[in-house]
Amino acid sequence: EQAKAATATLKRVWCEALRQGICDSFANEPEGSEYNVQINDRNQYEAGKLRKFLLNVNYIMEDTLRVLTEDSLHKFAEFIKVATAYDVTVNDTKNVSVAYQHPTNPSIKERPPLFLLELGLSEGAFDYSTPVQTFEAEPIVIFD
C-alpha cells in the first residue's frame, strides 16, 4: 500500500514538476526552434532535438528511480539483518536461550523485538495477540 502511495506521489508531483519545468524553460523558444514545445507536426517532433532531449530526461528519471530503489532495498535489508540478529537455542520446550548479537557493534547486547507475539484464546479459538497484517506493515513503518 505504501508503494502504491509512493508511486502515485511520484507520478503526481515529480512528473508534473518536471513537465512544468521543461515547459517553462522552453517557453521562450522561437517558432522555428528545434526545442519549441508548441510543435504540432508529429514527424518534425520525431526527427527533432526536443524528442531526443525528452528521451534523455526519461532515461535519467528511470536511472534515478533505480538507484533510489536499490539504495532503499539495501538499507531495508540491513535494517532487517540488524533487527533479527538473534541467536536462539532451543534445548527443550521449557529451556530456550536467546542472545542478541549486533552484526557491527558488539557492545549492543539487547534490542527490542519488532513484534510481541503471544498465542491466546479469543472467542473460544486460538489467536495471536498481534494481528497478522501488522507483520507486513510494522517493519516498513519503523524503517521509514
Image (cartoon, rainbow, N blue to C red):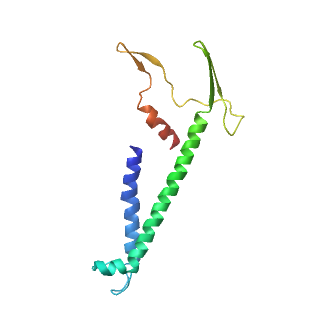
Reply above or below: 123 against 74. above
Q: Quadrant of residue 99?
A: top right
- Where 44 sits versus 7, above or below? below
Q: How many marks?
A: 0
**Which residue is located at x 34 percent, y 77 percent?**
46
Q: Is residue 39 left or right of residue 63?
A: left
In-front residue for pair 96/23:
96
Spot occupied by residue 51 in the image (x, y as percentages of width and height): 38, 75
Residue visible at 52% across and 49% down?
A: 72
Q: Residue at x 44, y 16 (%)?
A: 120
What is the quadrant of the N terminus in the image? top left
Q: Quadrant of residue 95?
A: top right
Q: Position of residue 13 (x, y in %)?
A: 39, 59
Residue drawn at point x = 40 percent, y = 32 percent: 133
Q: Residue furthest left?
A: 40
In the rendering, at what x and y percent does residue 140 appear? 48, 40
Residue 51 as seen in the image, left or right of residue 67 = left
Q: In the depicted view, which residue is nearer to us: 105 or 20?
A: 105
Picture coordinates of residue 10 (x, y %)? 40, 56
User: With respect to residue 40, does 138 lie above or below?
Assistant: above
Residue situated furthest right in the rendering: 107
To which quarter of the image does residue 122 belong? top left
